[in-house]
């Protein structure tokens, strides 16, 4: 723990991954473990890890990278944090992210700009950009992130590490600051598939505090990893190699598919015909849920309160105007609009119907195949500011990750190689609760 703290001190001025370093808390927990001793079976015990700053930590500042929560200190731990503490893992700090997890580059953070671990001129991806950069740069062996439309997998891809978004319901959302509740899921970013699998094993399982958490049995995800893929049937959607996907990403993923074949898997082309509607539908649905979830930030119950206000309504207006950044406001306006009586049928309802069609596309493929494989993102990490004046371009970046959240499926990104000295992520998608298959196939790229 001391070595990790020293390393963070030395390297974080370069990466800006951390919002808060939990020095005293981490050292106290480590001392306690030293005194009581560690059981050899407790594989995570004594090992430091990082926590995305939208996951609440008792007595430790939790900001969601927003001015709104600049001084917010929660009074309880999220279930995922509690579970890792029970496993002896040591939370060492809170990681930067896009404000309220809205974004794909970590540029919407109110506090700082996290850099890509491979090239500090490039974005780290997002919204879990701090988690990805901290892991990829060697500051910590793993971190927690959240994935609503790709926020674990895409930053993992941009930083060349392993990012797992489990099945919706696999991991408790209790204590995760809500963005879009029917999409949000906690995920793991780690340097290897095996590390990632160990952490998910500790996190997964039903939680009485989250009624959407599943009672599905939790296997030891790290137990049976081999590189023998004989009999595994892999489907490659032709839409995942369409317009907008860069040539160097295609080439790297095609080489990855050859690796899977050489280990015994069969690979066929399939179609997920509704893929093209995913981004439009997601930004309506997720923004609608966000506009509702973010109502609680009213200047009274939580967080930032504006000064010098005229009356109660002015207090709401000023607190929200000054406390939220532009991207968050854009989502609240979009969401409120699509839920309003006059536009519900034209927007929200249609988007919800598309969500069902996309889930059905996947169901059809999984009737015949074990896994779907393709790129995680259409391109590698890009320069800061490159897309920031056109949110639509940034939104399109999520085209290959969003379908997984629409259908509540598990998805994982592993590093498949490099293009222009930047990592290329390969995405594995499974049917519900099939995380074991993802780890199995991903292990070939360990
Ligand atoms: N980039 C997507 C968005 O901005 C996904 C974010 C996420 O998964 N939290 O909504």
Image: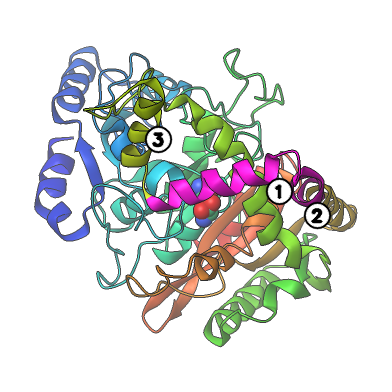
User: Marks 3 and 1, how far apart in space?
Assistant: 21 Å
Q: Which numbered disc, 3 or 1, marks the residue that appears first in the sequence?
A: 3
For disc 2, does the CB lie below 8 Å from ligand 1? no
Give the residue pinned by disc 1: 406
Residues marked 3 and 1 touching at CB (< 8 Å): no
Tell me if residue 407 can be seen. Answer: yes
Tell me residue 58's x, y (percent). 31, 18
The boundaries of the magenta stretch are: 326-352
* Residue pictured at 84% horizontal, 67% vertical: 273
Tell me the quarter of the image containing the N terminus.
Answer: top left
Count neighbours of disc 1 (C-alpha within 10 A) and say few if under 14, some if 14 to 19, many if 20 or more. many
**Most common secondary structure along the magenta stretch:** helix
Tell me residue 323's x, y (percent). 32, 38
Q: Which mark is residue 358?
A: 2
Q: Is residue 81 above or below residue 163?
A: above
Give the residue pinned by disc 3: 54
């Amino acid at each position: 723990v001391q070595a990790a703290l020293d390393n963070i001190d030395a390297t974080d001025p370069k990466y800006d991954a951390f919002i808060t370093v939990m020095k005293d808390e981490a050292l106290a927990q480590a001392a306690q473990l030293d005194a009581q001793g560690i059981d050899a079976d407790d594989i995570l015990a004594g090992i430091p890890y990082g926590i995305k700053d939208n996951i609440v930590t008792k007595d430790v500042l939790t900001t969601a990278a927003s001015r709104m929560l600049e001084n917010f200190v929660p009074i309880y731990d999220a279930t995922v944090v509690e579970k890792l503490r029970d496993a002896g893992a040591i939370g060492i700090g809170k990681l930067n992210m896009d404000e309220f997890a809205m974004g794909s580059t970590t540029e919407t953070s109110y506090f700082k700009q996290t850099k890509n671990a491979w090239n500090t001129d490039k974005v780290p991806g997002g919204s879990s950009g701090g988690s990805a950069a901290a892991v990829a740069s060697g500051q910590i062996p793993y971190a927690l992130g959240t994935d609503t439309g790709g926020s674990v997998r895409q930053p993992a891809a941009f930083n060349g590490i392993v990012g797992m978004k489990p099945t919706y319901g696999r991991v408790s959302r209790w204590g995760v600051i809500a963005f879009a509740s029917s999409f949000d899921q906690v995920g793991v970013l780690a340097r290897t598939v095996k590390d990632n699998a160990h952490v998910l094993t500790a996190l997964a399982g039903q939680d009485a505090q989250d009624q959407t958490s599943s009672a599905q049995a939790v296997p030891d995800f790290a137990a049976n990893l081999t590189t023998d893929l004989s009999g595994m049937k892999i489907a490659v959607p032709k839409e995942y190699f369409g317009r907008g996907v860069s040539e160097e990403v295609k080439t790297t993923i095609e080489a990855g598919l050859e690796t899977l074949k050489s280990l015994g898997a069969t690979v066929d082309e399939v179609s997920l015909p509704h893929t093209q509607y995913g981004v439009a539908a997601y930004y309506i649905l997720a923004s609608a849920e966000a506009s509702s979830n973010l109502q609680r930030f009213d200047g009274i119950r939580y967080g930032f309160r504006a000064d010098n206000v005229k009356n109660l309504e002015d207090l709401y207006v000023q607190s929200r105007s000054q406390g939220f950044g532009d991207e968050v406001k854009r989502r609240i306006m979009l969401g409120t609009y699509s839920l309003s009586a006059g536009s519900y049928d034209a927007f929200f309802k249609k988007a919800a119907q598309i969500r069902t069609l996309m889930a059905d596309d996947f169901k059809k493929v999984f009737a015949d195949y074990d896994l779907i494989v393709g790129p995680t993102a259409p391109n590698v990490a890009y320069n800061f500011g490159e897309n920031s004046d056109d949110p639509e371009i940034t939104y399109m970046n999520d085209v290959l990750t969003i379908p997984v959240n629409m259908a509540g499926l598990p998805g994982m990104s592993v590093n498949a190689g490099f293009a222009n000295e930047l990592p290329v992520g390969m995405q594995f998608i499974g049917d519900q609760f099939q995380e074991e298959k993802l780890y199995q196939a991903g292990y070939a790229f360990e």
